[in-house]
Image (spheres, rainbow, N blue to C red):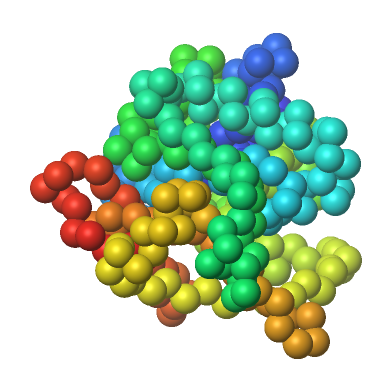
Amino acid sequence: KILIIGGGVAGMCAATKLIKNNYEGKCITIIDKGKDPYTRLPEEVMCGGFGAGLFSDGKWSYLHNAVGGQLAKYMGEEMADKILDEAWSYILEFHPEPDKIMFSKPTNEPDFIKPYFNLRMAPAYHIGTNYLLQMGKAWYDWLINSGINFIWETEVKDIDFHNQEVLIENHTTLKFDKLIYGTGKSGIDLTQKLIDKYKLQKTAKSVQLGVRMELPQKYMQSIIDIAYDFKLYKKHNDGVSSRSFCSNNFAAYVAEETTYNMKSFNGHSYKQEDMINNMTN
């Protein structure tokens, strides 16, 4: 029995990899405190099938070790690249129109940027906001047809690693032989509980504070023409740095959710004429 906690992109990719490696779907259970891709709402940004990725801006901009992530640090660049390619193959398999996916790979840093920033050169795929829900449903249907069992709208309260049991609501327990732990931001409380309970080792890391701003598209157009999803990077004193993490051009919609008394905002990009507002966020 393989139990996957978290039905986000990590959990779904894990289940997909198991099926493609000839594990039987009936042996796999995915549990998530959100809703499935058919019933979750756009404002339910953090929980549910495929996590924030299902209602995010549709960019796959970390297919390179130069920008973000720790994968290569733990397993080496060769294995990290192999896993990234494998995950990307899932996107292509379930995307309704894979030929519509855009790809940008900037090669030159413009002179007008050099005195102020470094323009990070990282390849980025643009899946398309309007395709995400279709893709999520198709992927979910494939997992269902593969025999995987899903438990939605159910929160995990505790994990007993010694007896290999997961405690969920109403004092119900689920047995497992293997456990895949793939919670996201909404699983912070459970993660901290497990760290304290089992005295798990922690590693301190720097904190990143994000601010989303919106401004007229014309001020960013010269950079967008070079790299649609550009990364601006600037080093300051004492090892402190600042960077941009994503850009949403023609950003016509921002989803809002309150999690742990903090508001989360998510921008979307549209290409339909009636949605364009000539703003970038």
In the rendered structure, the answer to whether residue 65 lies left or right of residue 276 reads right
Q: How many marks?
A: 0
Determine if residue 146 is in view.
Answer: yes
User: What residue sits 47% from the left and 76% below the top?
Assistant: 211
Residue 101 appears in which quarter of the rendering? top left
In this rendering, is residue 239 above or below 119?
A: below
In the rendered structure, the answer to whether residue 244 lies left or right of residue 236 reads left
In this rendering, is residue 181 above or below 191?
A: above
Residue 158 x %, y %: 66, 57
Residue 221 x %, y %: 37, 59
Determine if residue 33 is in view.
Answer: no
Residue sitting farthest toward the left: 274
User: What residue sits 50% from the left and 22% below the top?
Assistant: 92
Q: Nearer the viewer, residue 25 or 239?
A: 239
In the rendered structure, the answer to whether residue 83 lies left or right of residue 278 reads right
In this rendering, is residue 208 above or below 142?
A: below
Residue sitting farthest toward the bottom: 237
| Quadrant occupied by the N terminus | top right
| Quadrant occupied by the C terminus | bottom left
Q: Nearer the viewer, residue 184 or 200?
A: 184
In the rendered structure, the answer to whether residue 29 lies left or right of residue 32 reads right
